[in-house]
Amino acid sequence: MISALIHFYKERGLNFHSPYRAPFGGINCSEDCTAEELNFLLCCVNKTAICEKIKYVTITARPSCYNQALHEVTDKIYLQAGFIHFLNQRNFHIEVRQLPFSDIICKQESRRLNKCKREGFEVAQVMNPVMSTIYLFLENSFKQKQYPLSISGSQLDTLFNRFPDKFLVFAVHSESRLIAVSIAVRVNERVLYNFLMADLHSYRSFSPGVLLYEGIYTYCQKEEIIILDQGISVDHNGLEKPELIRFKKNLGGQESLKITYKKYL
């Protein structure tokens, strides 16, 4: 039986790195795993890296909101093992409660939500999505904002085919027209991660993303998911986007810490 594990990608023979296509990595372990066992795991990583002449090891840990107690334990263990805080980022999440979504958002977003509903926009989970259509929508939206899309269409297809119960699509339609879409990842029983999200620029005055969030939030309530992870809020250069941060906070988003650790060998 596995008590703890950690995944790495070997980058150009120089670096052990948390998998790039995953939003986070780090130690996964059972709740009864001891600090001694986790120290042993990192010791094995260190020995393997030295044997393979690796120059440094990079770990992108999950946000602290996933499990604050485990975050505090693993943070100490990483530091004791010689890792440093290479990058500290603000992550945002919504605590899913019994309250309706309209009660946790600010008045400005509540007005936008009601505006979407008055226009007859509808939000729902997309069952058996046509991924080529979804990807094209995402790609066009990102191009309009002059942001690169971090995943290709074939990679997205592969993820949906391999993990059909983990990757979910939510969409907002105006009659038959797709105007907003989100791809979410079921991380575990407690957490849903809002992986990719986009809307039509021509519908920005309605802010259909608010209605999209309500649909995702309602899904979380039904599935007894308690953390809706909104992710970090940075551009392709790693700089924070103030407007996106404000939007997430207006929807009830709370801050937590996401740390990237590095150890030079």
Image: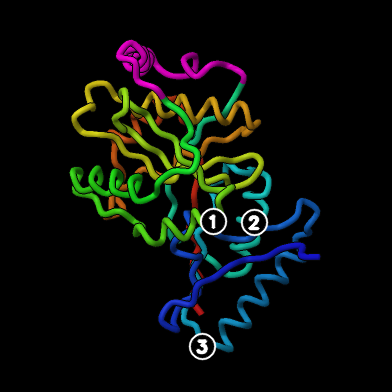
- How has the structure been colored for display? rainbow
The image quarter in which residue 35 lies: bottom right
Q: Is residue 162 magenta?
A: no
The residues bearing labels 3 and 1 have C-alpha atoms spaced at a distance of 23 Å
Horizontal relation, residue 203 to residue 105: left or right: left
Foreground tag (2 vs 1): 1
- Residue placed under numbered mark 1 in the picture: 61
Counting from the top left corner in percent of width and height, residue 79 is at 59, 62
Residue 264 lies, in percent from the top left, at 48, 75
Q: Earlier in the sequence, mark 3 or mark 1?
A: 3
The residue depicted at 77 percent of the width and 62 percent of the height is 3
Amino acid identity at mark 2: Thr
Q: Which residues are magenta?
A: 98-122
Residue at image x 35%, y 45%? 134
Q: Quadrant of the N terminus?
A: bottom right
Amino acid on which the number 1 mark rests in the picture: Ala
